[in-house]
Image (cartoon, helix red, strand yellow):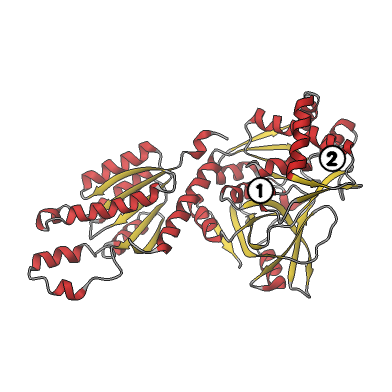
Amino acid sequence: MNIKSHNTKIGLFGIGLNTYWKQFEGLKERLEEYLQVVARGIEESGVRLINAGLVDSVEKAFEAGDDFKREDVDLIFLYVSTYALSATVLPVLKKANVPVIVLNLSPAARIDYKLFNNLDNRTQMTGEWLAFCAACPVPEIANVLKRSNIPFFQITGMLHDDRDIWNEIEEWINAAKVARVLYYNRLGLMGNYYSGMMDIYTDLTALTATFGGHIAIIEVDELSALKESVTDDELSNKIAVIHEIFEVQIDCSETEIRRAAITAVALDKIVDQYQLSSFACYHKGSGNAVNEDTMSSVILGNSLLTGRNVPVAGEYDVKNAIAMKIMDEFGSGGSFTEYYAMDYIDDVVLMGHDGPCHPAIAEGKIKVKPLQVYHGKVGSGLSVEMSVKYGDITLLSIIEDGRGRMKLLIAEGQSVPGEILEIGNTNSRYQFSVGAKGFVEQWNEHGPAHHCAVGSGHIGSSLKKLASILKIDCIQIC
């Protein structure tokens, strides 16, 4: 992956009114220390922080905007420390032109009223009051940003001892990291659509305009040709990896394991050659024995790639390759799945696919089984069988609204134990707060493709923040 994708930059500035500094001794220094508390917290997330300091004049606002623009920041946190003029905010954000999060953070849960009222100096009292005035200019700022058509988001709480606000800050930073990864994402497309599977057909230009990245169109013949270059050492190493990662069932022949391993090595070479960080593929291969052999042996290699930060979507589902990439970058996995049946007794939805799977989110070790036929596809070969680890899960689908616009569709639920179909496919049982019936009806209402990405954990809040950064709509049904 391009190293730039990891170089997330976060802008930070505080605001105040320079008229106050001569009037109230120590106020500026106190507010600057508050700003440093925020700065240290952001730096702990591992990003590069561009701290413009306390912007207390219009002149400093223009300088800060230039700095943020020059440094190519991905996101800006505006720390509101006391009353300040909106004129010290607008030049910064207009020039930087990135999402802004307004931090309305009080230095404590409340003013110590008794201590405050016992101060014998009215000027000192006013200075103390101003140190707690973070909420005061937020309506003014919001008014000006609204009228300037600059989107903004708010985090309101306490500077100290408030875990909720730091969770929110962390989610925004993680969303900014994922947005930058998507901007530099190199998505490989190999083969063609499954004929007639119209829900996954999409506009590649619109997809790139929405999420960024570059799409490389790759011929299946290239993958087939690379299989001829696989060395004995590469083959034996890949077979060892397959046995390490997967629980290879006793009825898997050495011939099929070898065939899958050769194709897996060739897939690695394709990824390296095109510097791919995501991938989608499908090709019938019928009429060409070499390509049929290639495409009927990709599932293990695709699953291994998915497990190492190069998610692979089957059936040429380009949108789902990006959905899987998003889930993976949030650290939730991102396995290829679809729902196929419902259990009304246990009120669960059964979901899975014939691969690829994400090894990092498997419940136990993934089984490899031979399939005598790939349903709906040409040939036979090895497939993967797994359930997503039990506990919280999130589903993500990238949907289109018929007007060329992309949206995120989200559902949170639980992966639960129980009987699954042991047919050599990924299979999981999911429960949702709206029930199985409510889930499928509400999910279908928004017109998703039949594939989606599943990941561990509840990350709906983070996905909504990513959608805000990307300036697209986001729908969460549960």
Looking at the picture, how far across and down is residue 146, in whole percent? Answer: 37, 59
Q: Which residue is mark 1?
A: 319
Q: Amino acid at mark 1?
A: Lys
Looking at the picture, how far across and down is residue 30, in whole percent? Answer: 21, 55
Q: Residue at x 31, y 69 (%)?
A: 109
Q: Which SS class for mark 2?
A: loop
**Tag of residue 296:** 2
Frontmost residue, 187 versus 95: 187
Q: Residue at x 17, y 65 (%)?
A: 128
Labels 1 & 2 near each other (Cβ < 8 A)? no
In the rendered image, the quadrant that contains the C terminus is bottom right
Q: Is residue 138 left or right of residue 472?
A: left
Q: Residue at x 65, y 45 (%)?
A: 203
Asked whether the viewer can see residue 217, the reply is yes
Looking at the picture, how far across and down is residue 217, in whole percent? Answer: 69, 34
Frontmost residue, 65 versus 127: 127
Quadrant housing residue 219: top right
Q: Is residue 150 left or right of residue 181?
A: left
Compared to residue 229, the image places residue 478 above or below, namely: below
Looking at the picture, how far across and down is residue 4, in whole percent? Answer: 49, 35
